[in-house]
Image (cartoon, rainbow, N blue to C red):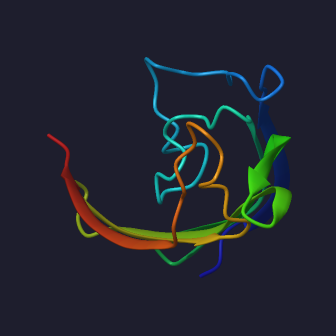
């Protein structure tokens, strides 16, 4: 009934040039790497430090997966009340189920919560709270 379960902790840092410009991946996507709410598809110019815990396992045929992210900037940024380095936190969860040998269904959930307001930084966009759900199906032939 229960298969292998796992828990892991990771950290990814995309650096900044003293808050002037951050490492970018223009030909790739950060959807798989920095939360499913897609708040950081473009790296903020203050850089990003993503520390996250991953939990995965399965029950019967269903595969379960969850992540909890803590997003910080590599360089401090100006806020309306001083300086800060916290972009926010995000919880992601999914369940995948094979209905047949050719049809696979997946339900995904993401919730991003903003921390320090960093919209006062010139050239930075505020990342407000966001909640999103995806339902997908894949047919293999």
Q: Nearer the viewer, residue 107 or 29?
A: 29
Residue pictured at 61% horizontal, 47% vertical:
34
Instruction: From the viewer's side, name the closer residue of 58 and 90.
Output: 90
User: Which quadrant of the structure image shows residue 107?
Assistant: bottom left
Find residue 28 and report its horizontal and vertical position in percent: 46, 24
- Report x, y in % for residue 120: 63, 53
Name the image quarter holding the C terminus.
top left
Q: Quadrant of the N terminus?
A: bottom right
> Considering only vertical position in the picture, is 19 above or below 56?
above
Where's residue 9, x and y in %? Answer: 85, 55
At x 43%, y 17%, the residue is 27
* Residue drawn where x is 84% and y is 24% of the image: 18
Kindly tell me whether residue 118 is visible in this rendering. Answer: yes
In this rendering, position of residue 76 left or right of residue 134: right
Q: Residue at x 25, y 70 (%)?
A: 99
The reply, left or right, for residue 99 in relation to residue 82 is: left
Q: Is residue 72 visible?
A: no
């Amino acid at each position: 009934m229960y298969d292998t379960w796992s828990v892991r902790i990771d950290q990814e840092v995309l650096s900044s040039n003293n808050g002037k410009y951050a490492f970018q991946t223009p030909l790739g996507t950060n959807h798989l790497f920095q939360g499913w709410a897609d708040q950081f598809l473009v790296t903020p110019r203050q850089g990003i430090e993503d520390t996250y815990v991953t939990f995965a396992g399965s029950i019967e045929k269903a595969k379960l997966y969850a992540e909890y992210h803590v997003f910080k900037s590599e360089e401090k940024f100006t806020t309306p009340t001083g300086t800060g380095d916290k972009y926010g936190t995000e919880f992601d969860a999914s369940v995948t189920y094979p209905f047949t040998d050719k049809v696979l269904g997946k339900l995904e959930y993401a919730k991003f919560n903003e921390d320090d307001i960093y919209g006062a930084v010139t050239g930075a966009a505020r990342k407000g709270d966001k909640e999103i759900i995806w339902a997908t199906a894949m047919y293999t032939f």
